[in-house]
Amino acid sequence: GGVTKSVEDTFGYAYNLLCESSPSYAKESSELSRLMENEQKIGTYHFNQLIFDLAQYPQSFSGLLAQDLLEFMVARVASTPKKERENNPNVPKPTVETINGVLKAWMVTPNYHDAVARRVESVLAKLAGWQSDGTLWGVTPDTVSYN
């Protein structure tokens, strides 16, 4: 299956899920809620912010949802012709901050303590695959990724 949901739909789903699960987040996330109301273009910065928020407001789904958002971003990049990827604001391209945010979200996800190391390794392994097949470039794990 290809990527069927739009960037806005995917982002909105994840944002609303976190708001419903964390009343304190719903109160404090004014920047992202304004973005949703104004239907501005949603890009890398916004996805990263939401992934960071999943780590900051731990839920039972934080790691899974953060990783889903990362994989959605990668799928968008992969489904966009190479010429259009570089400066296209409609293609939220993952950065090293995205990867670190996903790893952090896994580390704070309740009830996953035993599986966190495996989850983190799988994210880094996927990243290596995306780099080697040319889907992602310029995204290299840094010291934060490994700590």
Image (spheres, rainbow, N blue to C red):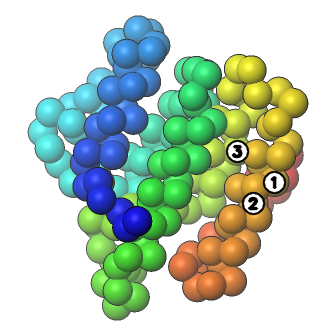
Image coordinates of residue 68 in percent, x first then y, are 52, 48
Left-right relation of 81 to 68: left
| Quadrant of the rendered image containing residue 57 | top right
Foreground: disc 3 or disc 1: 1
Q: Is residue 17 above or below residue 105?
A: above
Q: Which residue is mark 2?
A: 124
Question: Please, what secondary structure does the residue beneath circle 3 have?
Answer: helix
Question: Please, what secondary structure does the residue beneath circle 1 have?
Answer: helix
| Callout 2 touching callout 3 (CB < 8 Å) | yes
Residue at 45% of width from left, 57% of height from top?
A: 72
Q: CA distance from mark 2 to mark 1?
A: 5 Å
97, 132: nearer the viewer: 132
Image coordinates of residue 6 in percent, x first then y, are 26, 55
Name the amino acid, label 1: Glu
Q: Which mark is residue 40?
A: none
- Specify few, some or many for label 1: CA neighbours under 10 Å numbering under 14, 14-19, or 20 or more: few
- Specify few, some or many for label 3: CA neighbours under 10 Å numbering under 14, 14-19, or 20 or more: many
Residue furthest out toward the front: 1
Q: Is residue 132 above or below residue 60?
A: below
| Quadrant of the rendered image containing residue 135 | bottom right
Residue at 14% of width from left, 44% of height from top?
A: 39
Image coordinates of residue 62 in percent, x first then y, are 58, 31
Q: Which residue is mark 1?
A: 121
Q: CA distance from mark 3 to mark 1?
A: 9 Å
Q: Is residue 64 visible?
A: yes
Name the amino acid, label 2: Leu
| Callout 2 touching callout 1 (CB < 8 Å) | yes
Q: Which residue is mark 3?
A: 103
Left-right relation of 70 to 2: right
Image coordinates of residue 128 in percent, x first then y, are 73, 72
Residue at 39% of width from left, 35% of height from top?
A: 14
